[in-house]
Image: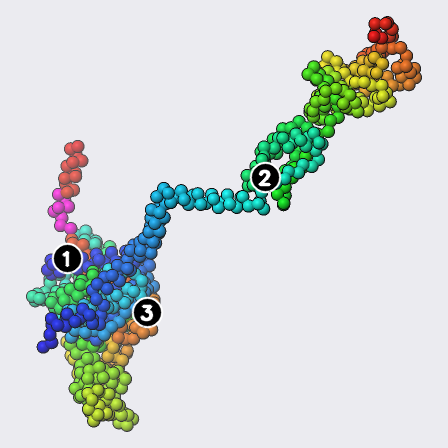
Amino acid sequence: MSVENYKTQIKMRNARNAAIQKGVISVLDVGTSKISCFVLSFDGPSGFKENDGIGSMLGQSSFRIIGVANTKSKGIKFGEIENVHEVERAIRLVAQASQKMAGKRVDHVIVTFSGGSPRSYGMAGKVNLPEGYVTDDCIARSVESCDIPDYGIGREILHSQPVNFAIDSRSGLTDPRGQSGNALSVDVHMLTVGSVSLENLLYCVQRCDLEPAGVVSASYSASMSSLVEDERELGAACIDLGGGTTGISIFLKKHMIFTESVRLGGDHITGDISQGLQVDFDTAERIKTFYGGVLATGMDDRELIDLQSNTGDWEHDSRKASRTEIIGIVRPRAEEILEEVRDRLDAAGFDHLPSQRIVLTGGTSQLAGFDGLASKILGQQVRLGRPLRVHGLPQSVSSPAFASLVGLALFAAHPQDELWDFDLPKRSYPARSIRRTTKWFKENW
Amino acid sequence: MRSMTQKRFMARFFSTGSSRVSYRLERLWLTKYVRVFVKCILPVSIFLSIIILYTLEQNRSQYWVDKFFGVIEHIADKPELSVKLISIEGASVSLDQEVRNTIPLRLPVSGFDIELDNIREAILELPAVNNVSIRVVAGGILKIQVDERTPALVWRNQAGLFLLGTDGKTVGSIGSRAERSDLPFIAGDGANSRISEVLKLMELAAPISTKILALEWVSNYRWDIVLSNSQRILLPPDNPELAIDRFLLLNETYDILARKISRIDMRNERRIVIAARIETNLTNE
């Protein structure tokens, strides 16, 4: 892990602490089809208690949403920024609107990132325990001892979370501190993304006078709000069907163990409709939203839909298409997306998990009959996930399309420990030399 | 390929999102301290500074001060509020004049300028005034209700003849006894502090009151009753009432006063001394 990367992450973590101290922070979801922003108000430091853990309320009682804004995004393809100025303006729009609604100025923002072709790595580290029990220092050393794989030039670490601790032969520990043993080993899940697209995103945010207080993988944050606790414990995959990308995140023992993203999404379905029916993109989006589906019935043959294009050619503009035709366009693409997801899940070894629950979320999951299709391709345990209710969440943004943003709000309140949250292990030499110096002073003065 | 330069130029005027400047201004406005400053501190300070700058010019402030007092004066000078008349009730003619001389007012005067407490104190200082109440009543009248101290005795000392109230305070002075022959007459230094005693003795001595000329306080310790035909009854310092009773009994029995007696000494209750009068030509003169 590069030092630069480490410093950036530490800086963002400090910014987040400062924001929580202030009591307001905004969360921003820069997606392919929409950009939306929440302003969260925290109850203050007293709202966070060490022993709270993740309770049944999942910590959402400690904050409330006081500002919401949402706009159509421009200049983003596959979750990556294509036109910096367009995106900057859109971010500025949602930031301004949400701050106006909140009535507060917000300086810090946590951003989701769905592009940059994320790649997951598993790492393991192991240290001996000289004291005979696990101290904070031991954990830091064990994390540091992880053998970081060569993830390539032009990539950066987005997440690196310790997911499992093992002392000697006992595995599956979440908090090993204070336990006795001879050796501590740790499993770390690391997620890397392309650094160029990440930098573009941070550049856009900084251009809006906002200080990034963290970047979170979109598929991770979507699963934060859509998976329930037992799914996260027993093993589940959250499929975040977005506009440009489909994020996959696999959870086991309350930790994310795998993340992947398919560069296919709802926009491709819209594009197919647009091409197939020869209508413009916005009309295709409307047709998909109102009449889209994946399972044709006899009734759908008789349902004719106006293709309201406005070229001026009456013959062209007054065409009609039956719903079966539309479903005929949507279904192959939906199958393609789900098959891609199936491949990624197979590659990750999802079928070895104790429970193989699949939760569909994101805007595209609202397509009629999508869960039925998904259960045919991905397995029987499919359900549609909606974001959890949090304080102050308006009805208009409680659809699955906002799962990622709501999850980000939950993440802001209850962040996961990352590699950079552990102090650098104390090198024994300087500490001993200082101790020796003070001892010398005490003896001689 | 779309034009990049043109688009950005036009975007300044027709941008769908908010411009950078408006975004920054909005954020500035949402900043807590800026809001407090603009909404509270700024208007208050502007308002105060205008007032201060306005009043800093001497003439202007003087103008307003003059105007303020002018208004007050204007109200005070209204004829409805001025006092034109003094009415004194419960005072004799001489006291009435005396009270009028005491009041330091030049009528007509505004009701605002009369200080009733001062006037009241000035009137109370007059010896003949027991109590006084003053108020301004409708119609511009200063009403003075005087409770006059009525003289009960005439007292002679070395300085002259004085009228005394029942409380022993001097009410006034007279030139001769004849002016108030209706009042009992006492003499002697310190007699004025024993008025109640005098009144009681006079009451006891009522049967011979026509003959009594005066009560004299002798040597600041006992009383003499001075009678008309140069007779004198000497009373003891202790229990003079009993002595008077005894004398009256004696007089009733023997009609002493009709006899040629100059002095009846009652000072010793066991031994009454009666001095006969020696008539000489000298005394007759």
- The quadrant in which the N terminus of chain B is found is bottom left
Residue drawn at the location 73% of the way across and 29% of the way down:
B150
**Residue B137 position within the rendered picture, expressed as x and y whole percent measured from the top left:** 63, 43
The residue tagged with tag 2: helix, strand or loop?
loop
Q: Are marks 2 and 1 on the same chain?
A: no
Task: Indicate whether residue A371 is drawn in magenta.
Answer: no
Q: Are marks 3 and 2 in contact (CB under 8 Å)?
A: no
Count all numbered tags in the image, as a single digit.
Answer: 3
The residue that mark 1 highlights is A7
| Nearest-to-viewer mark from 3 and 1 | 3
The residue that mark 3 highlights is A393
| Nearest-to-viewer mark from 3 and 2 | 2
Identify the magenta region: A426-433
Q: Which mark is residue B108?
A: 2
Q: Chain of mark 2?
A: B
| Overall secondary structure of the magenta section | helix
User: Quarter of the image holding residue A88?
Assistant: bottom left
**Residue B19 position within the rendered picture, expressed as x and y whole percent measured from the top left:** 21, 66
User: Quarter of the image holding residue A419?
Assistant: bottom left
**Residue A17 position within the rendered picture, expressed as x and y whole percent measured from the top left:** 24, 57
The residue tagged with tag 3: helix, strand or loop?
loop
Judging depth in this view, the residue of B105 and B30 nearest the camera is: B105
User: Quarter of the image holding residue A51?
Assistant: bottom left
Vertical relation: A44 (above or below) A387: above
Question: On the picture, is A243 further left or further right than B126?
Answer: left
Vertical relation: A155 (above or below) B251: below
The residue tagged with tag 1: helix, strand or loop?
helix
Amino acid tagged 2 = Pro
Report, in whole angstroms, how far the alpha carbon at label 2 lies from the one at label 1.
Answer: 95 Å
